[in-house]
Image (cartoon, grey):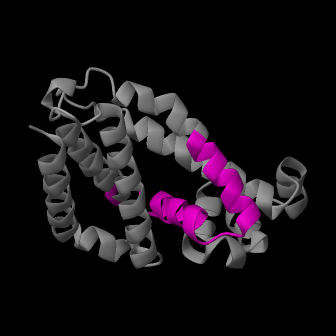
Amino acid sequence: MDACIHEFAEKGYEKASTNTIVKEAGISKGILFHYFQNKRGLFLYVVDYCILTIVEEYNKYPLTGTGDIFQRLSELSVIKLKLTHANPEISKIMMEALGNTPADIRSEIERRYSQLSSEYMPAFFEEIDYSKFRSGVNPSKAIEILMLFLEALGDKYMKNYLGKEQELLQNYNKLMEEYNEYMEILKYGMYS
């Protein structure tokens, strides 16, 4: 698995070589393809492994019991950056998987992300204090706007830092400052 992660992280899906993987892993190509059939199957397996690793790591950082959706989202963002810093090759693979793979593979990975989100996100929204929203603001619509915004912001960062993951980590304070500024604007429009 280490050889696969390293090769896909360094070269991306298209340029990764199964010859390099088998050489580094000390196995035969026949064994590799016996279990994974092709490079696509291997890559999807590696992505699944990376997702599970990130979920396990994420579970080590429990969120505080705050009912404030903005504080909870900020905590989640800090955890994501910590995980990116602690797992740089896995983070590179995840960015590659969502931003730079052939369409059929990307759609399969997006399906897996969606499935994971539907499993884990409901717990994230438990015990939110909806009384903080201004009168006339539908809390479910406000949260939907927040999630759409965060998805778009994530896409922006993925495009800007694809292949430059170390730079992403070096700009942590700048990114958090920008993130907090956006959140303050949204909070001003949503909270009383």
Question: Is the C terminus in the top left, top right, bottom left or bottom right quadrant?
Answer: top left
Q: Is residue 100 above or below residue 183?
A: below
Q: Main secondary structure of the magenta part?
A: helix
Q: Is residue 107 magenta?
A: yes
Is residue 185 at all visible to an observer of this figure? Answer: yes
Quadrant of the rendered image containing residue 172: bottom left
* Residue in the picture at 14% in, 61% down: 181
**Residue 65 visible:** no
Q: Residue furthest front?
A: 136
Residue at (28%, 68%) from the top-left corner?
A: 169
Q: Position of residue 39 (x, y in %)?
A: 79, 63
The picture quadrant where one finds residue 123 is top left
Instruction: Determine if the magenta segment contains residue 166.
Output: no
Q: Would you say 103 lies left or right of 86 here?
A: right
When asked about the image quadrant of residue 173, the answer is: bottom left
* Residue name at image x 33 percent, y 50 percent: 80
Kindly identify the residue that appears in the image at 30 percent across and 41 percent down: 142
Q: What x and y, as percent, mark residue 150?
A: 35, 54
Span highlighted in magenta in the image: 85-114
